[in-house]
Image (tube, rainbow, N blue to C red):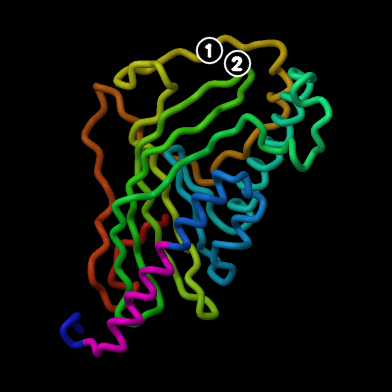
């Protein structure tokens, strides 16, 4: 099948599907920014596919339990960080209620742009790739630090009960470095600060399929290989999946 063989109604439906997929990714990235991580899996991810997976530079979270655990750990750690900041800045935050305090001092802005989306001719799956230029804050035992991140999202979608859901997602950081530092170089960790030591007790789970999906840029890094860009297809079996 080719685009020229589609009826006007089919072309209109494909346009609507592409718009909905763009909105799903927009909502996903805004949910990360608004510290709604505890609801992200239930809202955006497939619940019917056993092989759902989330890929980051350092490996895969494979399966619903691993992905939910990752987002849940991020949400729990944000709560710990918020309580810590309240204790460190009592004059500004001492009387703030917990629901308003949650996420104070945080920034996790990884917006999407330059969309490339291909909806299968059978209408059941889709692939999308977006570039990402973002910034985020890290709270660690070394204190707070600001980071720049440039990379891409590569996502497989599947239609479930008439809604587009994330099936496989890669968020790959090509450049990931603390602000104010030379991003062509690697850097030693910052020294730990005793007032932030409590964060050592709030770890985020590591991938259950560890591997190196992408090494962040430094001037000695070998050329990187991106997944294939989305292209027209009829059924998902024809594709190279963006998952494991």
Question: Few, some or many C-alpha atoms within 10 Å of disc 1 (few <14, some 14-19, many ≥20)?
Answer: few
- Exactly how many numbered labels are in the figure? 2
- Rendered view: 135 above or below 87: below
Lateral position of residue 25 relative to residue 203, left or right: left
Query: Which tag, 1 or 2, sits closer to the chain's start?
Result: 2
Segment colored magenta: 6-22
User: Which residue occupies the foreground of this view, 148 or 101?
Assistant: 101
Up-down relation of residue 203 to residue 158 (above or below): above
Q: Quadrant of residue 177?
A: top left
Q: Are marks 1 and 2 in contact (CB under 8 Å)?
A: yes
Which residue position is annotated with label 2?
142
SS for callout 1: loop
| Circle 2: element type | loop
Q: Could you tell me how far apart the alpha carbons at marks 1 and 2 are, in whole angstroms?
A: 6 Å
Instruction: For the N terminus, give its image quadrant.
Output: bottom left
Give me the residue at 57% from left, 39% from top. Answer: 206
Please provide percent x and percent y for residue 97.
82, 37
Where's residue 50, x and y in %? 55, 66
Give the overall secondary structure of the magenta segment.
helix
């Amino acid at each position: 099948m080719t685009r020229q063989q589609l009826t006007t109604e089919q072309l209109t439906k494909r346009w609507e599907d592409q718009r909905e997929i763009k909105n799903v990714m927009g909502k996903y990235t805004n949910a990360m920014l608004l510290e709604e991580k505890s609801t992200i899996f239930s809202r955006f991810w497939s619940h019917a596919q056993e092989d759902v997976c989330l890929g980051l530079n350092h490996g895969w979270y494979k399966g619903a339990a691993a992905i939910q655990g990752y987002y849940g750990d991020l949400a729990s750690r944000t709560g710990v960080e918020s309580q810590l900041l309240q204790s460190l800045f009592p004059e500004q935050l001492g009387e703030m209620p917990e629901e308003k305090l949650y996420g104070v001092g945080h920034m996790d802005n990884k917006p999407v742009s330059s969309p490339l989306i291909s909806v299968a001719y059978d209408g059941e799956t889709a692939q999308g790739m977006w570039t990402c230029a973002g910034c985020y804050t890290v709270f660690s035992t070394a204190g707070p630090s600001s980071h720049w991140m440039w990379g891409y999202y590569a996502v497989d979608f599947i239609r479930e009960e008439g809604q587009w859901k994330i099936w496989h997602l890669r968020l790959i950081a090509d450049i990931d470095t603390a602000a104010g530092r030379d991003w062509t170089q690697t850097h030693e960790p910052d020294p730990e600060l005793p007032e932030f030591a409590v964060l050592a007790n709030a770890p985020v789970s590591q991938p259950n399929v560890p591997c190196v999906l992408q090494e962040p840029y430094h001037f000695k890094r070998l050329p990187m290989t991106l997944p294939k860009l989305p292209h027209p297809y009829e059924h998902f079996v024809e594709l190279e999946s963006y998952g494991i």
